[in-house]
Structures are given as structure tokens and as C-alpha cells.
Image: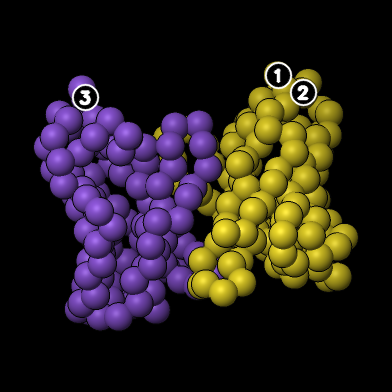
Chain colours: A yellow, B purple
Amino acid sequence: GAVVSQHPSRVICKSGTSVKIECRSLDFQATTMFWYRQFPKQSLMLMATSNEGSKATYEQGVEKDKFLINHASLTLSTLTVTSAHPEDSSFYICSAPGQATDTQYFGPGTRLTVL
Amino acid sequence: GQQVMQIPQYQHVQEGEDFTTYCNSSTTLSNIQWYKQRPGGHPVFLIQLVKSGEVKKQKRLTFQFGEAKKNSSLHITATQTTDVGTYFCAGGTARQLTFGSGTQLTVLP
């Protein structure tokens, strides 16, 4: 099946710094990718939809200036958490729509800890 | 907007016992998908149901889609320790998924 990778898998940073997370579709092209955030023992919450060649679409309540998304190619989307604070600590997961199926393929996730 | 609720939130069972999680949507769904997330892992697609009243089986797992396409269930027969994880239902399409709150299953050996 389709494979989606994420890098890094874990990151610890100081408050006020910026962190970039990469999401790649390894064996298929993805004009759209999705970024989710998952707090401990909670469900996945869609943050934004990343669109290749155009601006990302953000869900209500998600600050576009804080969570910068760039979909530079058909296989890469990046999420940059700017000026991270401890409350941004979470599990960030990207996904891409399936090609032949009406499903999403998820990356392994990035666990962000902001000290 | 669309809301998808799941119950129970947590379930502890003894190995060998059965387990069921229920999913309810506030709106009619075009399809329902089920995902499993192991502790520390990411969601993995299990199955998709599309038709009203559809029932699908995967070994010990039985998935059902309600007649009104607003609810669904996942039933595991004779749980094993490998079944541990959180099971999420999700409604929508590949372009727009709304995840349920999830049911965290613990299987005691």
C-alpha cells in the first residue's frame, strides 16, 4: 500500500523556537495532504489541508501564522510550528489520500515536546 | 458541523472475551472507516463500509454499518493481547475525514 513518511519522529525544543516537520509520500504523488494534531488520549483533530501549488486551508481555531504549511512538491508537505510554546506539545500526524481507495494513509507521526 | 461520537471511551477486557465499540454520527455518512492506533503509533486503516446495513468480517473482527448510515460498530471476538490499541471510526471521504473520539482497548492476559 501507499507509504507516507514523516521526519523527525521526535523533537524536543525550547520555548520560542521554531520546528519544521516534513511529510513525504514515498511511492505516489499527493496534491493534497492533511495535518492532524493529537493530544494524549484524545482523537485526531484536523488542523489544515495542504494543497500543492496553493495556500493551505486551515480549520477553525488554527492560527495560520503560527502553523506554517508549505506544499512545495507533489511528494512533500512541511509544517512549521513557529515560536513554539509548551501548549504546542503534541503528536503531529500527516496523511495523504489514497489513490485507488477512498481512505487516507497516515505518516508515523512526530512527537513534539516544547520545554 | 459533523460530529462523530464513540462509546465506550475505554474498555478493559480479559483475554478471550469479546469487545464492541459503537460509533454514532450526527449526520448521514457516505461511508464509515475504521482505524486502529497502537500505543505510540499512528492510525492504520482497517476497513471501509459504504452500503446501508453492510457487514464485513476480517478474521475475528466484524464491522457493521447501520441502515440509516449514521452509526457503525466494530466487534472483536475472543480478544487477544495483540488487539490492544485505540480504535477510531471516521466518516467522510479521502478528502475530508471526521474522526470519532476513539475507544481505547486494554486486553488483560
Q: Nearer the viewer, residue B99 or A87?
A: B99
Task: State whether residue B41 appears in this view.
Answer: yes
Residue labelled with disc 1: A115
Q: Amino acid at mark 3?
A: Leu
Q: Quadrant of residue B106?
A: top left
Residue labelled with disc 2: A13
Do marks 2 and 1 share a subunit? Answer: yes
Quadrant location of the C terminus of chain A in the rendered image? top right
Q: Nearer the viewer, mark 3 or mark 2?
A: 3
- Please report, as a chain letter, where disc 3 is located: B
Local packing at callout 3 (Cα closer than 10 Å; few below 14, some 14-19, many 20+) is: some
Which is nearer the N-term, disc 2 or disc 1? 2
Local packing at callout 2 (Cα closer than 10 Å; few below 14, some 14-19, many 20+) is: some
* Residue located at (80% from left, 56% from top): A76
* Residue located at (28% from left, 57% from top): B58
Q: Nearer the viewer, residue B96 or B85?
A: B85
* Residue located at (21% from left, 24% from top): B108
Residue labelled with disc 3: B108
Q: Amino acid at mark 2?
A: Cys
Marks 3/2: CA–CA distance: 37 Å
Q: Amino acid at mark 1?
A: Leu
Evaluate if marks 3 and 1 touch, with contact meaning CB atoms under 8 Å apart: no
